[in-house]
Amino acid sequence: MNDTPRYHPSTDPQWADPFVDIDEQRESPVPHRYVHGGFAGTTVLFSFYLPPADVYEGRFFQHVTPMPMHESLAQQFLAMDEENKIAMSFDSGAAFVETNGGTAEAMWADSTIGAYKGNAAAAEYFRVIAREAYGEHRVYGYLYGGSGGGYRTIGSSENTEGVWDGFVPYVIGSPMAMPSVFCVRQRAHRILHDKLDALVDACEPGGVDPLSLLDADEAAAWTEVTKMGFPPRSWFDHATMGLHGFRAIFGGVKMADPTYFTDYWTVPGYEGADPDSSVHAARVQHETTVAGFITKAEAVAEGLVPARVAEELAGNVDNAFAMAGDLVAIRLASAPPRDVIGADLVVTGGDAAGGEIVLEGTQGDAALIGMATSDVLNNLRVGDAVRVDNSDLLAAQTYHRHQVPDATYAVWDQFRNADGTPRFPQRPFLIGPPMTAGAAGSVPNGAFQGKSIVVASLMDKEAYPWQADWYAARAAEQGRGEDFRLYYTERALHGDAHSDWETQYVSYLGMLTLALRDVAAWAESGVEPPASTVYEVVDGQVIPAATAAERLGLQPTVTLTVNGGERADVAVGEPVELVATVEVPPGGGQIVDVAWDLDADGVFEVRDAGAHGESVTKTQSVSFDAPGTYFVTVRVAGQREGNPETPFGRLLNLARARVVAS
């Protein structure tokens, strides 16, 4: 157990002078009282959203973004569904609280401010406002956040006392996640790039063994990334995968371990020092000049950036690290010899000389900005000399091999000798734990207070699914297993938004809503939530139990067969029979929606909404008039109260089947 004294803001004088600068009634997105303010002498600001008295049940939900951001992000979501944190909270009998976490600059000065102290101060001051608004009462509070916000949520649960009653960290990483999960993914993406479409098809129902498509180097890269925990089905999104959060931490790696990027190319035992390695053919060091600047609208018009990627920041876990400004790319006077994924744009001439911009990559003569400081961008001019150089990004792609941690991290076993010693040269220190502590305020150890429910995704390509299991094991070691649950969502990714590829993955927002409601009932009334998802971890992959009765957790299971199997090879025009079998886990309510994409066009044109009971079997027949391979999809929704009308607490899943018409 953790015997270190825990933090409470009442003992910290920097929070002694709260102020309110807005206090008004608002009607959108739902009627509420809005209170905005902060703490004098600090950079911490807050927004409180108070529901009408007949809605409020004595609790608040408080959301934590992946990094300190704006305190009014929830106001961007107006649709009445689970992306609307205000409406979701009110529907759960809760007020809603959000802060800016201070500022990113303040967090660098004192990581504990952004990790938990600023949010704790806001939580305690909300209780003052709530008692003034609703009368004297016990105010329960629940903190939740995903990705980097998951670190901050865990850090709050392990470092505070008496501030929050429960916690819901979601899509969480381990202390070794940064930067390793991004490094191994980028290397696999580079080596497998030309085969990824075929590999995506191989991972679909009725596909072939992916290894059968690969040469020796490709097979080694596939095996390495898969054993590290990358879910193979998630390669479907490889075209827009990008650097993701790595763009925000890459600079920190270079500052913390600068000699690595020389050692990689020169010291035996590192891939870059091997003259036979394919990494040399991938290296680009292209000298050119700046020819112009590309705005967001121009990038979308040219097809450089999908419109959805160009949307404004909203604090979600997938876009929190994206560039917020209108400048998204730099036009180069000459294109590099090949497009690259990730690189540095090194400024070698002009007022910004010596500066570097981390690129998402290049497309022709366009260099897409990943991360840059404002002083470099503001001082960059047309005609300035620059170099597109992916040397450091390539070196980073095997950094995880030189960061072998303790035996609790089984995915690193592939880099250990039979006696447990590392196969590759090791860096002087593990960089992941201090990076994690910078976000969480400390290195997570499982010694949380209150109740905790973790929500994780089985197709998460940023926070690999095994990491939630790692934290569950640490909680058990600390004797906290009785106050802990872990729920996995099948067919869900990292992002806390609705699916924009509806035939490939589902949103986990319904499970997140239920987790918040369950942790509240647990803390307030002793109502134990459903049992954790049952699964096993095999070679880095989390494999859930097959049936709903065995798997438990919250999500319904669904299987889809075509002519009795996962694949049917038929003649053009020949009908096939589709059978979907759906079940909710014990206590999971009812199936309330079954939707079919029968034409394999990405549109669910056939729907059967309404309460269907705890298990249901649905059939459809379809034929295809042209030769081709078609993936038919069924998407289902469960709802604990069996209510098909509410947008909240809907638990989604989907299944696919292959039809080959010839």
Image: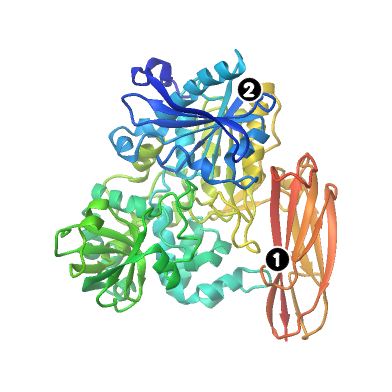
Q: Which mark is residue 199?
A: none
Q: Give the residue type that dot 2 points to.
A: Gly
Q: Which mark is residue 656?
A: 1
> Does 16 sit above or below residue 185?
above
From the top left corner, tell me how far across and down residue 383 is, in percent: 18, 70
- Label 1's element? strand
- Would you place residue 662 above or below residue 470 in this image? below
Q: Which residue is mark 2?
A: 58
Residue 594 seen in the figure:
yes
Residue under the point 44% across and 71% down:
301
Mark 2 or mark 1: whose residue is earlier in sequence: 2
Tell me where residue 54 appears, x and y as whole percent: 70, 25
In this picture, residue 318 sits left or right of residue 109: right
- Residue at (17, 58) in percent of width and height: 352
Residue farthest to the top? 136
The answer to which image quadrant residue 649 occupies is top right
**Considering the numbered disc 2 on the image, is that residue within a helix, a strand or a loop?**
loop
